[in-house]
């Protein structure tokens, strides 16, 4: 009998579940909002999202081999993949040393694998995505934050504390802008979406970036990183934010 894998992505705002086969093909998906009510409510919602994906795939629990969980814990709230514990992620209120793998086992009597979501995404790209066939891979995600994962020699490289690939909180600008983690000048505070939008708003306030303003209907407070990118080109020049100066 073919056996399948249940996968859950736990983020600060949403829970995604999917059923994949042994080739990595997605059979079904489900999506819910993350309840802001502490770990018990979140685990219950994770279980019911996973059950929804399972029934959408027409599968029973006996056909599932394992449960894989990628937790968007955000630094500096790491997790311990070996013990299945999530420490205190800044994006999940009321979480402190939560034995997430054990709590999920109460809902699903299956092997549960817990991993930092950026590491899990890196492994996914290496297995079935852009990094297929590569020995080493660096995975980066840029959105509200900057996350990263490393594959070295075909294995997830975690480093001493499981955060080896998390370059988002590497200091790149001493005394730079304050980061969500409490430190100053992290790459994330300088180069993630909100930072790009903030720099664009500042440029507009200083009388530059007229086109950026056009893309946000003339409202400085409505400028986003995407709008800034679209508006950031000069006649005859190329697009993009990589330009120096
Ligand atoms: Zn930081």
Image (tube, rainbow, N blue to C red):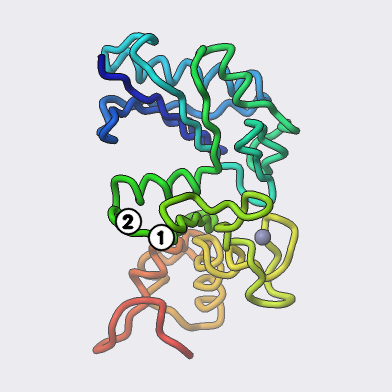
Mark 2 touching mark 1, by CB under 8 A? yes
Residue furthest front in the image: 153
Which numbered circle lies on residue 131?
A: 2
Q: Quadrant of ligand 1?
A: bottom right
In the rendering, at what x and y percent does residue 86 appear?
66, 35
SS label for mark 1 = strand
- Marks 2 and 1, how far apart at CA: 6 Å
Q: Quadrant of the N terminus?
A: top left
- First-in-chain label (2 vs 1): 2
Q: Residues within 10 Å of mark 2 (few under 14, many from 20)?
A: some
Task: Look at 36% across and 28% down and name the residue there.
Answer: 18
Query: In the image, 123: left or right of 205?
Result: left
Task: Look at 62% across and 55% down and name the residue there.
Answer: 159
Between residue 241 and residue 109, name the one nearer to us.
109
Between residue 223 and residue 162, name the one nearer to us.
162
Task: Look at 58% across and 70% down and name the residue there.
Answer: 190
In the rendering, at what x and y percent does residue 14 appear?
49, 34
The image shows residue 145, relative to residue 213, as above or below, that is above
Which of the 4 image quadrants contains residue 186? bottom right
Which of the 4 image quadrants contains residue 57? top left
Between residue 192 and residue 6, name the one nearer to us.
6
Mark 1 = which residue? 137
Task: Look at 63% across and 41% down and name the residue there.
Answer: 91
The image shows residue 132, relative to residue 105, as above or below, that is below
Between residue 82 and residue 121, name the one nearer to us.
82
Q: Residues within 10 Å of mark 1 (few under 14, many from 20)?
A: many
The image shows residue 104, relative to residue 194, as above or below, that is above
In the rendering, at what x and y percent does residue 2 appear?
26, 19
SS label for mark 2 = loop
């Amino acid at each position: 009998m073919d056996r399948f894998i249940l996968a859950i992505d736990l983020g600060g705002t949403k829970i995604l579940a999917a059923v994949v086969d042994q080739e990595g093909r997605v059979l079904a998906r489900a999506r819910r909002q993350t309840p802001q009510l502490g770990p018990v409510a979140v685990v219950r919602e994770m279980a019911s999202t996973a059950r929804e994906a399972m029934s959408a795939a027409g599968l029973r629990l006996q056909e599932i081999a394992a449960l894989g969980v990628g937790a968007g814990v955000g630094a500096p709230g790491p997790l311990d993949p070996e013990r299945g514990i999530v420490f205190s992620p800044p994006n999940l209120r009321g979480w402190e040393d939560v034995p997430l793998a054990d709590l999920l086992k109460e809902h699903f009597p299956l092997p549960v694998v817990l991993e930092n979501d950026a590491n899990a995404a890196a492994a996914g790209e290496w297995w079935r995505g852009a990094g297929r066939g590569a020995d080493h891979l660096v995975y980066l995600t840029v959105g509200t934050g900057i996350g990263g994962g490393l594959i070295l020699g075909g294995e997830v490289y975690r480093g001493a504390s499981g955060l080896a690939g998390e370059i988002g909180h590497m200091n790149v600008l001493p005394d730079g802008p304050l980061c969500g983690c409490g430190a100053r000048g992290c790459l994330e505070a300088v180069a993630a979406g909100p930072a790009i939008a903030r720099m664009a708003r500042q440029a507009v306030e200083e009388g530059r970036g007229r086109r950026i303003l056009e893309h946000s209907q003339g409202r400085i407070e409505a400028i986003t990183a995407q709008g800034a990118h679209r508006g950031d080109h000069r006649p005859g020049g190329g697009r993009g934010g990589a330009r120096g100066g």
